[in-house]
Image (cartoon, grey):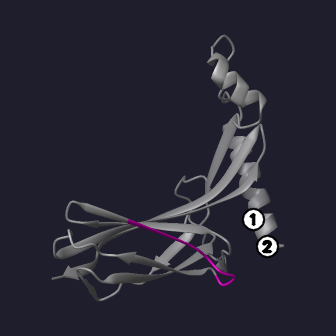
């Protein structure tokens, strides 16, 4: 129930903030035949609302050898530390709750090499992302960018997504 009330409040705030904005099709513009077919077939939402509702916490491995696998436990909860519209208003006093069924991905940057990974959270909002550190990576610190997302509503006129982002500098170290 709390999740539904939170989502309804965030959606109403978002719609209020978007009042007066135009959709993807503006009067007098041309979208072409392919665009019109996609629009008519319902593959394109005219408005897209992204609500920053997730908090991501990840635990770094101490170090991972080249050729080894980094196993990264992640916990996704809602609400985020700040308001869903990203205006910087803190959400103090709200007890976090597990976000289940959320897609969570990470991009590891090892020097100039990028390794992606992906998992889906369980009923407790937990997931473990496993990424093999390939032999062409060089030893050194690893920066990690985490992104969590979930589509709450997808209609021909409106798409509502929840998301969250977290960056960790020097998250762990790759060893030779």
Q: Which residue is mark 2?
A: 2
Q: Nearer the viewer, residue 56 or 156?
A: 156
Q: CA distance from mark 1 to mark 2?
A: 6 Å
Q: Nearer the viewer, residue 163 or 107?
A: 107
| 146 relative position to 8: left or right | left
Quarter of the image where one finds residue 19: top right
- Estimate the x, y position of residue 138 in percent, counting from the top left: 16, 71
Please give the range of residues in magenta: 116-124
- Magenta-colored stretch includes residue 63: no
- Estimate the x, y position of residue 172 in percent, counting from the top left: 28, 80
**Residue appearing at x 30%, y 62% in the figure:** 114
Res. 117 in view: yes
Q: Nearer the viewer, residue 168 or 43?
A: 43
Quarter of the image where one finds residue 92: bottom right
| 28 relative position to 72: left or right | right
Quarter of the image where one finds residue 99: bottom right
The image quadrant where one finds the C terminus is bottom left
Question: Which mark is drawn over residue 6?
Answer: 1
- Using a 10 Å C-alpha cutoff, classify the residue at mark 1 as few (fewer than 14 neighbours), some (14 to 19) or many (20 or more): some
- Magenta-colored stretch includes residue 120: yes
- Using a 10 Å C-alpha cutoff, classify the residue at mark 2 as few (fewer than 14 neighbours), some (14 to 19) or many (20 or more): few
- Estimate the x, y position of residue 29 in percent, counting from the top left: 63, 14
């Amino acid at each position: 129930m709390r999740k539904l009330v939170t989502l309804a409040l965030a959606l109403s705030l978002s719609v209020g903030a978007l009042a007066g904005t135009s959709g993807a099709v503006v009067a007098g513009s041309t979208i072409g035949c392919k665009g019109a077919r996609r629009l008519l077939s319902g593959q394109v939402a005219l408005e897209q609302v992204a609500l920053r509702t997730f908090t991501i916490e990840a635990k770094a491995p101490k170090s991972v050898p080249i050729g080894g696998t980094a196993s990264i436990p992640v916990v996704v909860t809602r609400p985020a530390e700040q308001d869903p519209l990203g205006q910087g208003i803190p959400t103090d006093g709200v007890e976090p709750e597990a976000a289940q069924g959320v897609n969570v991905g990470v991009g590891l940057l090892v020097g100039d090499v990028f390794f992606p990974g992906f998992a889906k959270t369980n009923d407790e909002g937990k997931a473990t992302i496993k990424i093999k550190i390939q032999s062409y990576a060089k030893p050194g610190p690893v920066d990690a960018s985490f992104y969590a997302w979930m589509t709450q509503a997808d209609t021909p006129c409106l798409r509502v997504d929840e998301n969250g982002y977290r960056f960790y500098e020097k998250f762990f170290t790759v060893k030779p």
